[in-house]
Amino acid sequence: MSEQKYEEYWKLTLEYTDINSEKFIGTLEIIVNFISNHYREPYSSKKYDRLQQEVNLNYPKADMGSVRKSINQFVKLGFIHPFLVSYNPETIEFINARTNRKRQTIFSKIIYKYSSFNSSITNFSAQKEVNFLLKTLEEVATLTKENIIGLMNINILDYHKGYVTADELNFHTNIAIENGFVSRKYNQVGYFLNLLNKLDDIIFINNILYFEEDAKVIFGEDLKQESRKRDGYLHRIYKNLLKEEADEKCMVENLSYPSLVASHIKPFIQSDENEAYDPNNGLLLSRNMDILFDQGHISFRSDGSIVFSSILDGDVKVHLNNYTLDNNFINDKRLEYLQYHRENIFEKKGLI
C-alpha cells in the first residue's frame, strides 16, 4: 500500500455552500456565458484575469483570491472543465431548474459524475471522490464520520476497483485519527460533510451515513425520529454467525456474492436487545434480495417458498419464482420471525 501523503488528498474548498443562492447560481451563469462567448480563444492567464474581473464586478470580494476560489469551486464540483474549455450539459439544466428540489437532484448527478476535488482552473484530476465514497458505501452499507475522514486520506488511484473494503476502510480510518487529520484540515472536512448533506438519497442519522432507502428500512419511514444506535461489534458477530450458517452464500439464491447483507427479519428498530442480534432474526441475502425483503416486496412462507407483493412486475416474479429459502435455514425461532415479517412488514403495507 502506498505511503500516505495526508496533505495532498481530497482537497475541497468552497466559496459558496448554498447551491440555491443567487451568488452560487449567478457566478456559475457568468462563467458559462464567458466560456460560450470566448470558446475559440485559447486559455491564457489574461483570459482568466478577464473572467475574474467580470465575476468580481457582479459579486465583489475583499480580494481576488476569493474571486478565484468562487470560480475554482465550479471546476472541483464538476460544472465546468479546467482551462475554461467547456462545461458539462447538466450545468445548463442546473441553472435553469425551476425548483430547489430539481436543482438538488441535478446537483447530485453532476457531483457524482464529474466532481474531482484536486481539479482546478489549471489542473485536471481523474480522482472522483464522491463517486468513490458512494461505491464504498454500497460495499460497507454505512459510513461513520470517522470513516469519511479516513476516506479523505486515500489516493483513489491506488484502488482500481473503485472502492475500499471494510478492512481497508478501517485501516485508513485509524491512520487518519492517529495523525490528527481533523484538527489540521478542519475546514476541508466541514466542506465535504456539508456537500454530502446536499446529495440525493443519502442521509446522516446519529452521525452515520446511510443510503436513505436503507435507513428507512432500519429506522422506519420517519427518519427524523429518535432511534437507538446499532452496536457495531454485536452486529459484526451477528453477521459472522449468519455467514457461518450459510457457508457465506445467499440463503435464497445459494450464490457466493462478494458482498452479502445480514438482513433483519424483524426490523432492527422494532427489535428488543436480544432480537436485534439474534441470528435467527436474520437472513444472509444478496443486495437485490435484501432490498426486496426489507421493503416488504417479498416474504417467505413456512415452507420457504416466496410470496410476492402485488406491485412487483411480472418478469420479476417469474425470475424469482423458482427460488426458496433453503429448508436448512428454517427452524422454529426463525419461523416466528418470518411470521412477524409477513404480518407486519409484508401485509402491513397492503402488498398482498
Image (cartoon, rainbow, N blue to C red):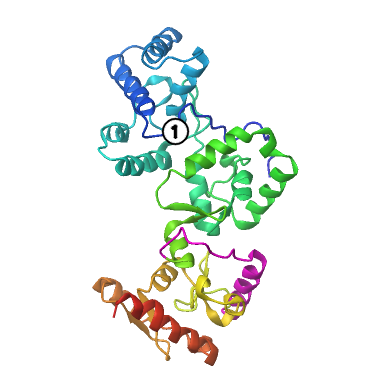
Classify 257 as above or below 317. Answer: above
Residue at which label 1 appears? 77
Q: Is 317 inside the magenta-drawn segment?
A: no
Q: Is residue 47 visible?
A: yes
Question: In this view of the protein, which residue sits in the foreground, 249 or 137?
Answer: 137
Q: Is residue 284 visible?
A: no
Q: Residue furthest right?
A: 178
Classify 160 as above or below 213. Answer: above
Image quadrant occupied by the N terminus:
top right
Q: Position of residue 75 (x, y in %)?
A: 44, 27
At label 1, which amino acid type do we have?
Answer: Leu
Element assignment for label 1:
loop
Q: Position of residue 58 (x, y in %)?
A: 36, 15
Q: Is 234 inside the magenta-drawn segment?
A: yes
Q: How many numbered marks, from 0 up?
A: 1
Q: Residues within 10 Å of mark 1 (few under 14, many from 20)?
A: many
Segment colored magenta: 221-246
Classify 56 as above or below 194. Answer: above
Image quadrant occupied by the C terminus:
bottom left
Question: In this view of the protein, which residue sits in the foreground, 265 or 290?
Answer: 265
Q: Residue furthest top?
A: 46
Q: Quadrant of residue 16?
A: top left
At horizontal 47% and vertical 45% (from top left) the residue drawn is 197
Q: Is residue 79 left or right of residue 267?
A: left
Q: Quadrant of residue 110?
A: top left
Q: Position of residue 170 (x, y in %)?
A: 66, 53
At horizontal 49% and vertical 88% (from top left) the residue drawn is 336
Q: Position of residue 216 (x, y in %)?
A: 44, 63
Q: Quadrant of residue 107?
A: top left
Question: In this view of the protein, which residue sits in the foreground, 213 or 129?
Answer: 213
